[in-house]
Amino acid sequence: MLKVLLVDDEPFILEGLSVLIDWNKEGFEIAGKVSNAFDALKVLQSEDIDLVFTDIKMPEMTGLELVEKVYKEKLSQAYFVMLSGYNDFLYVRTALQNECMDYILKPISQDELLKVLDKVRKQCSINSKKRMDDSIMEREVFAKNMIRICRGRYRKDNVEYVRRYLGDGKGFRYISATLDEWDEALRLTEDKKRQMQKELYQKCLLLFPEKEYLCMLDPTLREQSYDVGIIYSEEMAKKYGRLTEQECLETLRDKIRAAVDFPVIVIVGSRVENIEDISDSCKTTLLAYSIRNFGAGQSASDIPDDKPVNKQIIDSLIQAVKVNDKEKIQNESAGLVNEMTSGQYDARMINMGINYLMFELLHMATEQDDNVNQREVFHAINANALSHIDSEGGGEKLTEILVEYADYLVQLRTNKSPGILSQVEQDMRKNYRENLTLKDLGKKYYVNAAYLGQSFKKQYGESFKDYLNRIRIDAASDMLMYSDKKIYEIAEEVGYKDLDYFINKFIALKGCTPAKFRKQIK
């Protein structure tokens, strides 16, 4: 029902207008009847009114002054129809200048009133569809920028865009909600699973009616997934009153699960302070999925503890393995074993620490070669490492396992597997603004620069330099579409110090100048 407000200083006019037609039958509801403009303002500020019928000639404040004040101060988006017994063109002109929907002379006939209502009804329908289309587009553009940040492959303009919605808030988490494919009830077709995923997405949107853009359909952080991603922040927690963050997250998790009638996994990522670090929170959700999918026999908490077992020691051990520092591996392994067997942590906390270590070790292998059999490597490390976390060994067995694994990583690098090229390509996409060279990347990935250049061209069909230019020009195209920055500013942001060189490269790849490209898109 569209809400109507009637404003007239003559009581019989108000009463007559309210009974002239069957308002409900026409899809309208009379939300109020007032005798002056000041009372009308109070109603407009307290209720969502769609249509106002107001007399022009009223004491203290006229109907025209009422319309002018409402539109000027943006007090309401209601449509106005002016009522008057004066057939004076000046009134008509002024009313139309104030963007009134229509102007009706008294006495009002049923036909005139019904025509006006039909006009308002159609306009409201058009506006409603436009708002819906705008909302969908807004969510899609936000999601596009947010997903890049979640993957850790963002640009400055991606962060600037999402901050228009998130402000300068702190304390973010990535929440993943997905179908529980391990449940027997979900032995379903692909189409059915996608249908259920969309239903889950729509239900999640209803949980955040004022900030529905925080939900993303299929962020594709995992292959062949049925995920809905949610960006949680401290600000969101305020709607739950005085609950602690843990209680707030548990409440949100329960609401998501209760929203649909099929099994759903909800995993809450670790907390990060700034939105540009949300990829770290995403990693913890991927870790939980990996443990579940590899069937490691351990239970992963869907709401991780913010204080894992000596994370600093674990990170130091991971770094030692990465650079193949055998002496440091021995020292850090002993320290980790002593910490975990000290008796101050329960099994759940210890498992979380081990799971984190396992995931990072596995990630190092896939960084070098994306064709690595992840399941095989995970089970090999996991089975050995877990069985040797005991005080008797003092870390010796764990050291032995990790030293062997560090050698394995060196072998992957020596083999110069396709995974190296994949890492180089990802590095280019992430850091294209910088002065990237084959020489520097060769040092970073322990590969001869000349060999790297040859391998890159063979793998991607064009030289390193041409590929980098293509990435930069694609990024510039996005900025030309989604920002109002000047062309020289865009050139600098994507890594070009010479504006003429940037324009020439843009023409070569896009077939026109940046200015013409922007004009065509706009």
Image: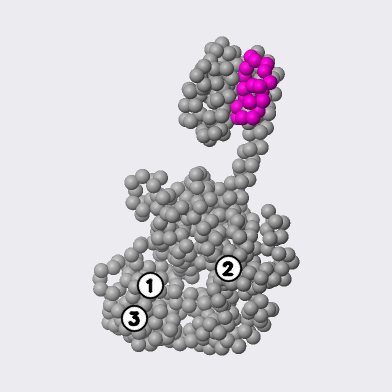
Whole-angstrom CA distance, mark 3 to mark 2, is 46 Å
Whole-angstrom CA distance, mark 1 to mark 3, is 12 Å
Q: Is 223 left, or right, of 171 in this rendering?
A: right
Chosen colour scheme? one colour
Q: Read off the residue under disc 1.
A: 354
Amino acid at the residue labelled 1: Ile
- The image shows residue 235 at horizontal and vertical percentages of 41, 50
The tag earlier along the polypeptide, 1 or 3, is 3
Q: Which mark identifies residue 381? A: none
Q: Read off the residue under disc 3.
A: 333
Provide the residue span drawn in magenta. Answer: 79-98
Q: Is 394 left, or right, of 297 in this rendering?
A: left
Tell me the quarter of the image containing the N terminus.
Answer: top right
Q: Does 190 appear in magenta?
A: no
| Residue contact at pointers 1 and 3, CB within 8 angstroms | no
- The image shows residue 108 at horizontal and vertical percentages of 66, 15
Q: Does 90 appear in magenta?
A: yes
